[in-house]
Image (spheres, grey):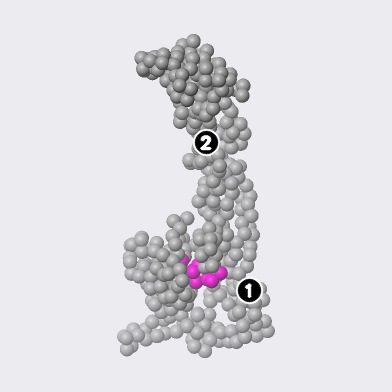
Amino acid sequence: MAVERCYYEVLGVERTANGEEIKRSYRRLAMKWHPDRNPGDAKAETEFKACAEAYEVLSDPERRARYDQFGHAGLRQTPAHDFSRMQVDDIFSMFADIFGDAAGGRGRRTRARGFDLETSVAISLEEALTGREVEVSFRRRDVCGTCSGTGAKPGTQPLRCPTCGGQGQVAQTGLGGMFRMVTTCPNCRGRGSVVAEACGECRGQGRVQKSRTLSVKIPAGIQDGQVFRIAGEGEPPPPEVSANGTGPRGDLHVVIRVEEHDRFERDGDDLITAQTVPFADAALGARISIDGIDGTQMLELPAGTQHGEQFRIRGAGMPNLRTPSRRGDLVVHVLVEVPRKLNDRQRELLRELASTDGGSIDEGRSGRAPAQAAASGKASGGRKRGKSKDKGVWEKIKDTIVGE
Ligand SMILES: [Zn+2]
Ligand SMILES: [Zn+2]
């Protein structure tokens, strides 16, 4: 999905702008970024599409209100036209009411295929692990069942458009007859017919918003932001082309959102987690259990494990989308935990440790810091491992911590 930009900024209008101001600004910007006027300029096309997306939301009072209150998140569950994957011609024909002749003839609605839609569905990381079938609910403009898409009140018939004589197009001459241009009939908007008495259900539009729910099978290993295309689940062809909606429908694009997890971060097929480990375990080495995404994993910590060290548990990550039998790794960041409180026995043992090793454990509070330990710390200048007498102290420290 494209970066979410503020719709008001995209259109260069105040948040208080009225519908007419928004329309005017959109029209101006769409002309400015018109791909025909900016050939080969990818930025212009991106801007052009961003403006269409912003206009579609801000020109609809209901969606604008939701956007004002909740931002982009408020629009997640409502499908929008998928402008980023749409042809420029289609965008012009969609907003033909605004562009009219300014589109330079591009606004002619001659396209038989319906428009694409986009919606999103959120799943948990666990669901991405196993894959699952989800219900995707969305709304789309569909053929009005009351009038079968004609827009005419049942029992009445649409009349041939008097402006274009049923052609759906009118010819205009410009610059004193210098050229002749064929454009969409402004009276019937290209339909060729006008409704004498409008259908009450769709108010003469021939299309109404309908809810639809589909079952989508999401494969294991899906990544956040990946898009499913479901062919033929978009809008039917526009009423100007096919009143009853027969003909190829657009597609539905379902953007998968994988929710953030409180214990795992994802890096491709790998999962990253952090595990706190008592300092005695880190020093002595230990076999520790890690909560994996699908069960407990055992990890052998070597003696002398440092804070921040990483260990990989092979095959305990996410399945690969293409080859689900192959899984990524679980990467464990070890956080060595130093006890915040010590009892007398532990303090005594640590002092003993400090006196035997290079450790300089400052016992400022009691004021009985062993001078010997500080001295030996400077002298040895580093840690010594593997000495049997050191090990004995560590083991005792571990016992006291485990015993609590
Ligand atoms: Zn109707
Ligand atoms: Zn007409």
Secondary element type, mark 2: strand
Residue 58 counted in the magenta span: yes
Residue furthest toward the top? 388
At horizontal 59% and vertical 71% (from top left) the residue drawn is 245
> Where residue 144 is drawn, which disc sits there?
1
> Where residue 309 is drawn, which disc sits there?
none
Residue marked by disc 2: 273
Front-lying residue, 36 or 23: 23
Crowd band around label 1 with a 10 angstrom C-alpha radius: few (<14), some (14–19), many (20+) = many
- Chief secondary structure of the magenta span? helix
> Which marked residue is nearer to the observer: mark 1 or mark 2?
2
Residue 197: x and y in percent read: 62, 85
Answer yes or no: disc 1 within 8 Å of ligand 1: yes
At horizontal 41% and vertical 65% (from top left) the residue drawn is 9
Point out the stretch of residues depicted in magenta: 54-62
Position of 361 relative to 133 (above/below): above
Position of 164 relative to 327 (above/below): below
Q: Is residue 19 left or right of residue 102?
A: right
Residue 353 makes an appearance in the image:
yes
Front-lying residue, 164 or 57: 57
Q: Specify the amino acid type for callout 2.
A: Thr
At horizontal 62% and vertical 59% (from top left) the residue drawn is 137
Residue 28: x and y in percent read: 38, 73
Residue 236 makes an appearance in the image:
no
Q: Specify the amino acid type for callout 1.
A: Cys
